[in-house]
Amino acid sequence: MPSSLMIDFIISLDGYAAADGWPGFWGMEGPEYLAWLDGDAEKQHTSLMGATTYRLMSGFARQMPDDPGFAWLAGMPKVVFSSTLRPPLSWDNTELVEGDAVAAVRDMKRDGTRPLRTLGSLSLCRSLLEAGLVDRFRVVVFPVITGATGRERIFDAYPDVTLDLVESRTFDGRLQLLEYVPTVLDGPPPSGGGDAS
């Protein structure tokens, strides 16, 4: 059975991955959400990332080796796609793939036994979605709008995609998890009587 691939983002309500001057998780992570992140079900996968995310996350891991989140990330298998990084990579359990990411992930899905999940890496996620390799698309929406300070707009340059909701839940009375099956479109669907404008 082939491995599944999930794109996994945390986002502000207006679609940013981060915001200047705000703390991690926009300062809104609560005990229920953190316990879910720490659960076994969230650790049984291989993380896929690009070079920018690798540099950022491995730097955090070096600075905070005793942080439980980075400790479990260090212990799990990770694959980084980059033409600029050189082996050996310093972060434990990380494999470097220097070739085409889409072709490599297609092979990993066909031959793998562990689920695959992205970590950040906006352009990598977009490429994998465009190639039709993504089985699930999950976001955890944080109830903030960071129009003045937001950076890394997640969905810019994405194709049109329809999303069928397969799971949802609320953490700590404020964070909303939404998990979808995505379908990439060649263009807008035929009119069904409604108007998106």
Image (cartoon, grey):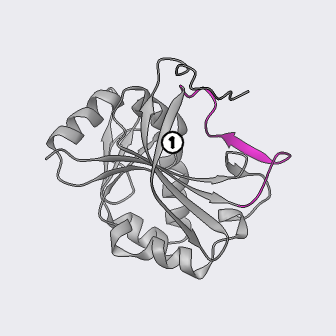
The answer, for residue 66, to whether it is visible in the render is no
* Residue 157 colored in magenta in the image: yes
Q: Where's residue 86, x and y in %?
A: 38, 38
- Outermost residue, bottom side: 31
Give amino acid for label 1.
Ser
Name the element at disc 1. Answer: loop
Taken as a whole, is the magenta stretch helix, strand or loop? loop
Q: How many marks?
A: 1
Please, is residue 112 above or below residue 66 in the view? above
In-front residue for pair 162/61: 162
In the visual, does 151 lie left or right of 97? right
Q: Where's residue 145, x and y in %?
A: 79, 53
**Start and end of the magenta stretch?**
143-159
Q: Residue at x 18, y 47 (%)?
A: 112
In-front residue for pair 167/153: 167
Q: Residue at x 68, y 51 (%)?
A: 18
The answer, for residue 72, to whether it is visible in the render is yes
Q: Where's residue 14, x and y in %?
A: 73, 46
- Outermost residue, right side: 148
In the visual, does 3 lie left or right of 100? left
Q: Residue at x 62, y 26 (%)?
A: 193
In the visual, does 85 lie left or right of 17? left
Q: Residue at x 50, y 64 (%)?
A: 62
In-front residue for pair 51/159: 159
Residue labelled with disc 1 = 121
Q: Where's residue 92, x and y in %?
A: 34, 60
In-front residue for pair 153/164: 164
